[in-house]
Amino acid sequence: MIKGIIFDIDGVLLDSMGIWDDLGARYLKSIGAQPEEGLQEILFSMSMEQGAEYLREHYHLDKSDAEVLDGISGMLEKFYFDEVLPKSGAKELMEYMKGKGVKMVAATSSPRLHVEKALGRNGMLEYLDKIFTNTEVGESKHSPKIYNIAAEYMGTTPDETLVFEDSLYALKTAEAAGYVTVGVYDAKGEPDQEGVKNSGDYYIREMTEFPEIYEARLV
């Protein structure tokens, strides 16, 4: 019997993955620079600090790394504060699970202030008992620490806790730690959808698909 859910936020609760695809290009255009072809792929594996350094050096920007980072961070903040919308069906699923008496928390790699503002603006924050961030936990989702802390907070064991993730590496981490996993499709997220589909205990392309799975297999 499922007693708790740990939701990832970006690509699961919020339709926010697209910003990470073009954040560097957005910033360059905002200061009158023309982004190169394939910039998204170049920046994909970099931290924001590394990305800021790359943009400054490669585009010969008359700014410090810190100034570039501040500019990027400002655009990201504006997106979360004012623009991002819920993932289709996410709010409805949270309402459904609330009606079933299932506890809900979130585990995210994004800054707390960003996601709290976005979830609050979209009327979703009220469904979550708590948000856990990788920064505050001190480890990425390559480690199960954030899931374990979240489950402990809810008072649930891994085998009675669902983890919703759109990233393959995070799904594998949760699965290896004994959690019941749900792989979530996102058009702008994980490129290895076959991996996501085959890794999790369950796989959904739309959040609205999950109640049927829950009623048939998890009650």
Image (cartoon, rainbow, N blue to C red):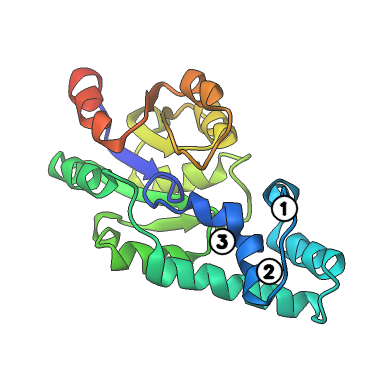
| 2 and 1 marks in contact (CB < 8 Å) | yes
Q: Is residue 5 above or below residue 72?
A: above
Mark 2 vs mark 3, foreground winner is: 2
- Relative to residue 194, is residue 36 drawn left or right? right
Q: Residues within 10 Å of mark 3 (few under 14, many from 20)?
A: few
User: For this rendering, which residue is in front, 104 or 54?
Assistant: 54
The disc labelled 3 sits on which kind of residue?
Glu
Q: Earlier in the sequence, mark 2 or mark 3?
A: 2
| 3 and 1 marks in contact (CB < 8 Å) | no
Q: Is residue 182 above or below residue 10?
A: above
Q: Quadrant of the C terminus?
A: top left
Evaluate whether residue 219 shows in this view: no
Q: Which residue is identified by label 2? A: 28
Q: Residue at x 30, y 47 (%)?
A: 104
Q: Residue 78, position in %: x, y?
A: 47, 73
Q: Is residue 143 above or below residue 107?
A: above
The disc labelled 2 sits on which kind of residue?
Leu
The disc labelled 1 sits on which kind of residue?
Leu
For numbered disc 3, what is the local secondary structure? Answer: helix
Q: Residue 176, position in %: x, y?
A: 55, 26
Mark 3 vs mark 1, foreground winner is: 1
Quadrant in which residue 63 is drawn: bottom right
Q: Residue 122, position in %: x, y?
A: 28, 62
Q: Residues within 10 Å of mark 2 (few under 14, many from 20)?
A: many
Q: Gap in Å between the C-alphas at discs 3 and 1?
A: 30 Å
Quadrant in which residue 159 is drawn: top left
Q: Earlier in the sequence, mark 3 or mark 1?
A: 1
Q: Is residue 144 above or below residue 129?
A: above
Q: Which residue is identified by label 3? A: 136
Q: Gap in Å between the C-alphas at discs 2 and 1?
A: 11 Å
Q: Residue at x 39, y 61 (%)?
A: 84
Q: Which residue is identified by label 1? A: 39
